[in-house]
Image (spheres, rainbow, N blue to C red):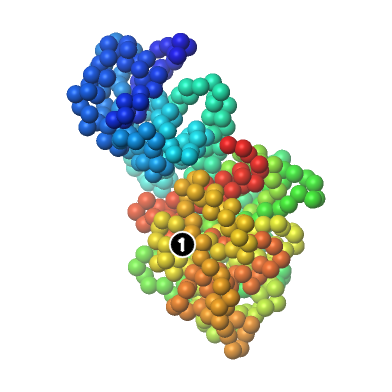
Amino acid sequence: MNNISYKCFSSPCKIFGISETKKFSELFCFVDKYTSNYINNFFLKNKSICKLGRLTLLNNVPNIGFDSILLVGCGKKIELSKQEFIKIISNVINFLKLNKIQNSSWFLTELLVKKMNLYWKIRIAVDIIGDRIYNFNKFKNIQMNIFKIKKIIFYIFNKRYVKKAEIALKHSLSILKGKNVAKDLSNTPPNICTPLYLTEKAKLLAETYKSTISTTIFDGNQIKKLGMNAYFSVGKGSKNLSYMSVISYRKKIKLKEKLIVLIGKGVTFDSGGISIKPSKNMHEMKYDMSGAAVVYGTILAIAKLNLPLNIIGIMAGCENMPGGNSFRPGDILKTFSGKTVEILNTDAEGRLILCDILSYVEKFNPDIVIDIATLTGACVVALGNVASGIMSNNENLANDLIYAGKLTEDKIWQLPLYAEYKKLLHSSIADFSSSGGFQAGAISAGMFLSFFTEKYKWAHLDIAGTAWNSKKGSTGRPVSLLCQFLLNKSGYNY
């Protein structure tokens, strides 16, 4: 450790992990030596400071050239679990916010986490920090004194790992930007974030990344002319026209290169239509466009990372409102595929939008199609706000997405698409009905979508329980998961 000097300590607060095992890092021992063993002696007299997640701030430590040391309890184990590491990072950033510490140096990447490497530790730490300091106050006249980070330094103790750390930080910050943009878009009120507003965002993305992104916009009339009658019908009751934004990210120009399509449900406000929702919490239905926001944020992150992929992202914007032109329970709609659907409930509108787009994207000859939607309250009942639901017609694709979720702690859980569930969508007067009734609501919705996905590998992510939090607003999920999935597809070796 001869290359360490106090000259590298450019922030006033240094953060170290401390455990009952007394397995202190070389750097910790180096600092303690200059304090005449002040820190170690403090530890010997106050061993309770090692309790997992406990924080102890030492000020006025002798013989050091910085203001304070924050000791973070790491418990009794030599190796932490993923959840224990996450708890430590969460406690630290909450402490910094509470005490308005804007500059800090983190020596927590040295902590051992079971089966996880340095890349993972940095990715998770940046993601947690970003979530804790995110704030949406665009529409407040009186700006609150918002805590902002000026500088966080992660110290790496082995030169061999510096490059890996730099890659992890680049990935983390790009994905965090995409996640925050998705949050901003979802949190924007529905009188501003209309389907047209989504197209403006799509155009801005193309203007920002001219070399890799192009955007094509379809308005409601064009959607109807294309034969997307189900999609068009959902928005008929609103004065705000429906718009579909097709965002193409092309990094590989060879025709043989496989294409990945991301489809986001973008219902900018969902009243339920004729089958109107209860008034309680209806204001949260601005979040019914979270799938589209996730697609937008994911494409932005991928563009910042300049990944070698071909991706098409579709934001399916519309508004589901009651009115004289609204579609009705009992209507039969002919979808883009030619299949007919009997409408039982106009509040099951997301699947009608998605089914037409799932058929439309066949023209691109995609290898993989993933739709992301706040689709069913039934998924919230099944999984709460912990995990998103996933259904797929391809087990390898499902496993790849589940793996990406495990790496990012953006959890998803697979629900089955057994053939027996098809009977829930039986209709005596159309090819099938739009709703499966009370039983297996999330699965019957996924089964409905599966009827339109026979030409490619497909996965459906139901994010109704995870896209937003009633108290904190949008979560930005599952931007991290999708970005990790696409990083994995790009062949990055971590």
Q: Residues within 10 Å of mark 1 (few under 14, many from 20)?
A: many
Q: Amino acid at mark 1?
A: Ala
User: Which residue corresponds to the image point at 57% horizontal and 62% vertical from the top-left?
Assistant: 460
Q: State left or right for residue 68 relative to residue 388.
A: left
Q: In the rendering, at what x and y percent does residue 58 appear?
A: 26, 23
Within the image, what quadrant is residue 41 found in? top left
Within the image, what quadrant is residue 306 found in? top right
User: Which residue corresponds to the image point at 59% horizontal and 89% vertical from the top-left?
Assistant: 428
- Residue 294 in sight: no
Residue at the farthest left position:
45
Q: In the rendering, at what x and y percent does residue 27 appear?
A: 40, 19
- Residue 330 in sight: yes
User: Which residue corresponds to the image point at 53% horizontal and 54% vertical from the top-left?
Assistant: 402
Nearer to the camera, 111 or 484? 111
Q: Looking at the rendering, in which quadrant would you find the N terminus? A: top left
User: Which residue corresponds to the image point at 54% horizontal and 26% vertical from the top-left?
Assistant: 161
